[in-house]
Amino acid sequence: VTQALKEGNTEQAKIVIKEDEEIDQIEKDIERLCLKLLLQQQPVAKDFRDVSTAMKMITDIERFGDQASDIGEIVATMPGENCPIKSTHISDMGDLAEKMVRESVNSFIQNDEALANKVIALDDRMDELFLLAKKELIEKIHENSEFGDVAIELMMIAKYLERIGDHAVNVAEWTKFNQTGVHLKF
């Protein structure tokens, strides 16, 4: 979705929207497998924590897809390359969201608590970029009120990207829980 956003590529945005259905199905499949493991294998200790962590994480991972699809829907209706407002902050947010998603999932796959901590630390930068984007868009509206509709759409995109960052932090928190057995919210 970050590519579609940067390039104003409405066709790429439509692909992202369609892929959300596949992500929803994968979430259901993983949930079904986890429940099957719980019922048939009755795991204990670390094995139980692995399965329960996976069940918790899939909700946040599915939300990545929902938020990306929401962004895709907005990008698909925007003027594309002719968009009167360009925001480097939103572009930076897209890059950071992509990194946070990738690294949060990798932290779980690799059982890497240090990588999970890095993802959690990146959330401060995401929040900072969100505030900068918000300020920038407000200034654009003050400069020319005709940009109001586009600025509001871009603000929605910024908020979705910020939420993707929050879900990446949740995945990182579940990675830490899986390693330590203690669930801390950051």
Image (cartoon, rainbow, N blue to C red):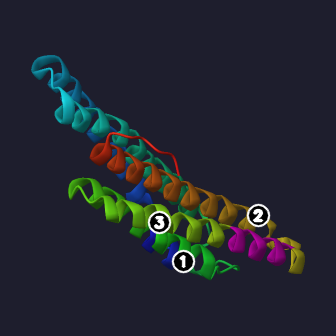
What x and y, as percent, mark residue 47? Answer: 17, 34
Q: Which residue is mark 1?
A: 92
- Image check: 186 left or right of 138? left
Please tell me which residue is depicted at 47% across the width and 66% down the height of the picture.
97
Q: Are marks 3 and 2 in contact (CB under 8 Å)?
A: no
Secondary structure of the residue carrying numbered label 2: helix
Dot 3 or dot 2: first in sequence order is: 3
Residue 174, percent from left and from top: 37, 45
User: In the image, is residue 134 part of the stretch drawn in magenta?
Assistant: yes
- Bounds of the magenta span? 131-141
Q: Residue furthest top?
A: 39
In this view, 96 is above or below 29: below
* Residue bearing mark 3: 97
The answer to which of marks 1 and 3 sits earlier in the sequence is 1
Front label number (3 vs 2): 3
The answer to whether residue 12 is visible is: no
Residue 119 showing in the rendered view: yes
**Amino acid, disc 1:** Asp
Which amino acid is tagged 3?
A: Ala
Q: What residue is shown with label 2?
A: 149
Along the viewing direction, whichever of 36 and 21 lies nearer the viewer: 36
Of tags 2 and 1, which is closer to the observer? Answer: 1
